[in-house]
Amino acid sequence: MPAAIDSPSVAVERTLEILEAVAHRNGGMSNAEISRKLNIPKSSASYILRTLEHRGYLRRDPESGKYRLGVKVLSLSRGALTGLDVREAALPLMRQLVEHTRLTAHLAILDGDEAVYVEKVDAPGFIKMDTWVGRRMEIHTTSVGKALAAWLDPDKVADILHSRGMKKCTVKTITTPARFLKELEKVRELGYSVDDEENNLGVRCCGAPIFGASGEVEASLGLTGTIQQVTPESLPKYAATLKEATARISRLLGYDGRVRRPHPIGA
């Protein structure tokens, strides 16, 4: 080990500094650039760089001599993202949403052909929604269900509707596959979904997708209130606030903005 590296802790600190510096430089960095930028002796930097290259965390361009991140780093990032549960990422923002909107927030995932609530934050006050963690919901009657379904392949959506049928919960429930697929087009266009008394009369909800690192929908988040609380006039404001929250959660899960779009039917 070069004499310039005084202790293991110094070596570790310099190694992390080098990885961070290379990660933030698109074109890569040479030994000289790293040494100059981080104020590390060239001999010490060279030793660390060779070790990182040997272990696969960096790769060296043979022509330019510059180092870039290696594929081994990807295995670390995948592990970190897998370890971050969507509930863990969403819950603080759900609480903020409820505090700001005074509505109830639900987090849902798609389990087979149903939307399932995996987290809930109740609105303050005496009005409580008759919902609970673990409740299973139809995708065609709920805002969280629509948000989960909108980015699925249409053939998959059609299979779900055929398997479960389209139960009519209220006079406003969508009960035909063609109309539901048109509804999902609208969801993708707006970036949010609406349950306008389609699951329960007197209750209006909006939902938005949460994207994971793969670009696919990992969960959906919904805001629920009475029709007096969520009026047609106030709905867009609530939806905008909801979309801001789901965008932040998606970023926490590693989403980079690239959406996996559903394929057209028959493609």
Image (cartoon, rainbow, N blue to C red):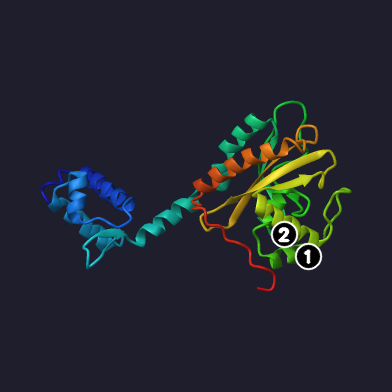
Q: Position of residue 15 (x, y in %)?
A: 25, 49
Is residue 168 or residue 114 the one in the foreground?
168
Count of number-bearing discs: 2
Counting residues from the start of the chain, the first of labels 2 and 1 encountered is: 2
Residue 163 badge: 1
Q: Quadrant of the C terminus?
A: bottom right
Going by the image, does 215 lie left or right of 62? right
Task: Indicate the secondary structure of the residue bearing disc 2.
Answer: loop
The foreground one among 265 and 93 is 265
User: Badge 2: how crowded within 10 Å, few (<14), some, or many (20+)?
Assistant: some
Q: Quadrant of residue 77?
A: bottom left
Q: Residue furthest left?
A: 3
Q: Is residue 242 left or right of residue 254?
A: right
Q: Nearer the viewer, residue 132 or 178?
A: 178
Q: Amino acid at mark 2?
A: Asp
Q: Nearer the viewer, residue 58 or 228?
A: 228
Instruction: Give left or right: position of 222 versus 82.
Output: right
Asked whether residue 109 appears in the rendered view, the answer is: no
Neighbor class of circle 1 (other Cα within 10 Å; few <14, some 14-19, many 20+) is: few
Residue at the disc numbered 2: 113
Furthest residue to the right?
A: 171
Residue at left offset 66%, top offset 54%:
188
Residue at the image position 72 percent from the left and 38 percent from the top: 235
Picture quadrant of residue 236:
top right
Mark 1 and mark 2 in contact (Cβ < 8 Å)? yes
Q: CA distance from mark 2 to mark 1?
A: 8 Å
